[in-house]
Image (cartoon, helix red, strand yellow):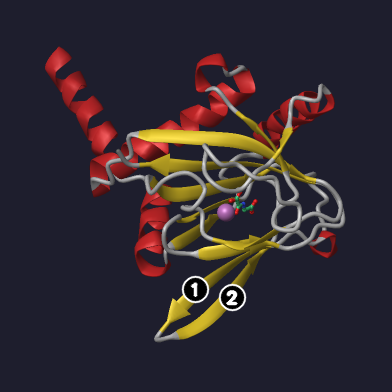
Amino acid sequence: MSESIQELFEQLEFKENPLYEQIIQDILEKKYSIIDGFFNEAEVAILRSQLLKKYEEDNFKKAAIGNKTSEVIERSIRGDFILWINEAEAGIAEKTYFNKINSLIDYLNRTCFMGILAKEFHYAVYPEGTFYKRHLDTFQNDGRRKLSMVCYLNDEDWKPENGGELAIYTQENGEEDQINIFPFPGRVVIFESQELEHEVKPVKVPRLSITGWLKTR
Ligand code: OGA
Ligand code: NI
């Protein structure tokens, strides 16, 4: 009896997850994946209110460029404000967030041997008129960032006219292509940190997100 339950658990654990499989296939094929509804409306709402509370309490800092020993605040390159999230001190909303992320990481490591050993995430607010010029995510810190992951926490009625698209630049046969992605709530974009240059277009309305990196050793 207990043996068959054990077997059932093993089957469950190793069963393919169609959503994760889609993400993996996208990344293998085009180095990025766009997942709508990765977080549902209720999850987005609670994370957004958490972000806004901390923003109003003045916990956010102007985001810098460069590495940790030589950080420079350069408003002509990026104008967002960020707050790093400590998983050990996460509240209920953030725990839900990390549960989903950790489940994805486990799956990637188990099925693709990605070797994700660390992660870092921050809230981000782009006030009206700000942007982040074209860049690669690796120059920020170190070469350990493997996958970049952005989750948008904007209001349900976010309009394309608000701007703030994430533009991803892809190369195919020496030709450059640009994919413009609207920051709709609940949408998650994952892309290869070392491979794809990208930018955040100027926003007309404050733009809210959690951005993070899955890192190798
Ligand atoms: C970044 C970044 C993209 C986005 O923080 O490095 O590129 O859509 N963010 O917010
Ligand atoms: Ni970036």
Q: Is residue 53 left or right of residue 175?
A: right
Residue 202 or residue 45, whichever sits in front:
202
Count of numbered circles on the image: 2
Q: Is residue 114 above or below residue 76?
A: above
Query: In the image, is residue 161 above or below residue 63?
Result: below
Image position, residue 139 (x, y; %)? 49, 53
Q: CA distance from mark 1 to mark 2?
A: 6 Å
Name the residue type under label 2.
Answer: Gln
Circle 2 sits on which residue? Answer: 178
Element on which disc 2 rests: strand
**Type of the residue with mark 1:** Thr
The image quarter containing residue 134 is bottom right
Residue drawn at x 59%, y 25% is: 94
Residue 15 appears in the picture as rendered: no
Q: Residue at x 84, y 64 (%)?
A: 161
Q: Secondary structure at mark 1?
A: strand
Q: Residue at x 53, y 65 (%)?
A: 197
The disc placed on residue 117 is none
Of residue 105 and residue 146, the one placed in the foreground of this image is: 146
Q: Position of residue 82 (x, y in %)?
A: 68, 37
Q: Is mark 1 within 8 Å of ligand 2?
A: no
**165 or 195: nearer the viewer:** 195
Indicate which disc residue 170 carries. 1
Please say whether residue 3 is visible from this viewpoint. Answer: yes
- Left/right of residue 161 with respect to residue 97 in the rendered view: right
Q: Position of residue 171 (x, y in %)?
A: 45, 78
- x, y percentage for residue 29? 37, 68
Q: Is residue 58 left or right of residue 64?
A: right
The answer to whether the residues at label 1 and label 2 have Cβ atoms under 8 Å apart is: yes
Badge 2 crowding class, 10 Å Cα cut-off, few under 14, some 14 to 19, many 20 or more, is: few
